[in-house]
Image (cartoon, rainbow, N blue to C red):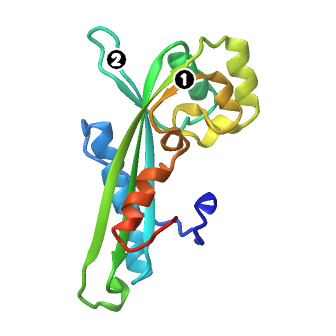
Amino acid sequence: MQSLGLSFTVDVTDADETVPPGTPPDETVLILARRKAEAAAVKHPGTVVIGADTIVYLPGEGNDDGVILGKPADDNSAHKMLKALSGRTHIVYTGVAVAVADYDIGAGANGTIRTECECIKTEVKMKNLTDEEIDRYIKTGEPADKAGAYGVQERGGAFVEAVYGDYFAVVGLPKAALCRLLSHFGVDVI
């Protein structure tokens, strides 16, 4: 956001991050980005609020269903995720939502929330990883808070052979989509 010249503050919300089982990844990120943006918007009426959510999805092989890779619970789950991604192409879905509330729910007033959302789908090809590379990377601590157990913008980028689509969506905030959405609220980044 700083690279776009936007001034901002971060407000972590307690938005519900559960979705019904079987919800497709593209719908999941839209639901969660919307919830996050709207939860913050009601706390800050009249303010343009941005919410985002990213999912790493590993398509199934053969008759196997695909799997969503969230943040690893521990080093062992990080290792399993990275091993599963090794040598394969996976999909990163990032949902971004922009919202403005014209009321404060806490004050009990009636009003509305205007929200615009977009989902960006990007394919990422990982190189073949050795167990030693995975273990060394896990020791850096980077995988702990990353969907899919890697950060393309950090050391994990060394594992990425190709990105097909929006690199910034893989990082977690697709700049072009965000600018499109902000323009609907009268915010011109350029």
Q: Which amino acid, mark 2?
A: Gly
Residue at the disc numbered 1: 162
Figure check: 127 above or below 138? above
- The x, y position of residue 85, in whole percent, is 51, 20
| Quadrant for the N terminus in the image | bottom right
* Image marks 1 and 2: residues in contact by CB distance under 8 Å: no
The part of the image, by quadrant, that contains residue 105 is bottom left
**53 sits to left or right of 151:** left
In the foreground, 141 or 33: 33
Q: Which residue corresponds to the image point at 37% horizontal and 61% vertical from the top-left?
A: 181
Q: Secondary structure at mark 1?
A: strand
Q: Which residue corresponds to the image point at 36% horizontal and 69% vertical from the top-left?
A: 99
Q: Classify mark 2: residues with Cα within 10 Å, few (<14), some (14-19) or many (20+).
A: few
In the foreground, 160 or 86: 160
Q: Which amino acid, mark 1?
A: Ala
Residue 19 has which mark? none
The part of the image, by quadrant, that contains residue 50 is bottom left
Q: Classify mark 1: residues with Cα within 10 Å, few (<14), some (14-19) or many (20+).
A: some
- The x, y position of residue 88, in whole percent, is 48, 15
Q: Residue furthest top?
A: 62
The part of the image, by quadrant, that contains residue 10 is bottom right
- The x, y position of residue 189, in whole percent, is 51, 66
Q: CA–CA distance between discs 1 and 2? A: 20 Å
Residue at the disc numbered 2: 60
- Lower position in the chain sequence, tag 1 or tag 2: 2
In the foreground, 15 or 172: 172
Q: Which residue corresponds to the image point at 23% horizontal and 88% vertical from the top-left?
A: 110
Q: Residue furthest front?
A: 190
- Residue 88 visible: yes
- The x, y position of residue 53, in whole percent, is 44, 50
**145 sits to left or right of 63:** right
